[in-house]
Amino acid sequence: MESVRYDDSRWPLFHVTLPASEMPDDAFAELLSTLDGLFVRGGRFGIVLDVRRSPGLSPKRRQLVGAHARATYERFPGRCVGVAVVLSSAIQRGVFTALHWFLRGTHPSRAFATVLEAESWLQAELAPNSNRTGAVRP
């Protein structure tokens, strides 16, 4: 069974690639724990979340991720400059953008077609002269 892949070799960019099959509960708990650990490293960072092959999260898991993210961002405001989600189709990217705009996420989030585009956006967000407002941008 394929597992979640983590890569911090380009820190402060942190790459997460979700597997093509549904994650077992222990792998999902490890994912949340790993993401929590990023906040205690210190400094600002961005997350590239590659879900192009992933079947997606169940509604219950999406709710858990949302609650978990809100609590973590409240404890460590400003550390995560954004989450760049890499999705396969333009329809998925459009739905993602609409939902995050409507729900007003805890951090800036954008959907991208490629990892390179995702990294470029996060690098701009990490720049010292970034005009970051903390708002979700389409």
Image: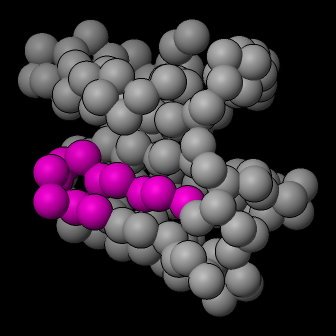
Task: Tell me which residue sits at (41%, 68%) in the image.
Answer: 5
- Residue interval drawn in magenta: 7-18
Q: Residue furthest right?
A: 59
Q: Looking at the picture, does residue 58 appear above or below residue 101?
A: below
Q: Looking at the picture, does residue 28 appear above or below residue 88?
A: below
**Residue 124 sits in quarter:** top left
Q: In this view, does 122 lie to the left or right of 110?
A: left
Q: Could you tell me residue 128's position as x and y percent?
A: 10, 23
Q: Could you tell me residue 67's position as x and y percent?
A: 71, 58
Residue 50 on the magenta span: no
Q: In this view, does 135 lie to the left or right of 9?
A: right
Task: Tell me which residue sits at (62%, 50%) in the image.
Answer: 53
**Residue 101 sits in quarter:** top right
Q: Looking at the picture, does residue 71 appear above or below residue 121?
A: below
Give the total of numbered labels: 0
In this view, the residue in front, 59 or 54, is 54
> In the rendered image, is residue 134 in sight?
yes
In this view, the residue in front, 6 or 97, is 6
Q: Could you tell me residue 75's position as x and y percent?
A: 46, 59
Residue 11 on the magenta span: yes
**Residue 77 sits in quarter:** top left
Q: Which residue lies furthest to the bottom in this view?
A: 26
Indicate the colouring scheme: one colour
Q: Could you tell me residue 24's position as x and y percent?
A: 72, 83
Task: Tell me which residue sits at (46%, 38%) in the image.
Answer: 83
> In the rendered image, is residue 101 in sight?
no
Quarter containing the N terminus: bottom right
In this view, the residue in front, 25 or 45, is 25
Task: Tell me which residue sits at (27%, 11%) in the image.
Answer: 131
Quarter containing the C terminus: top right
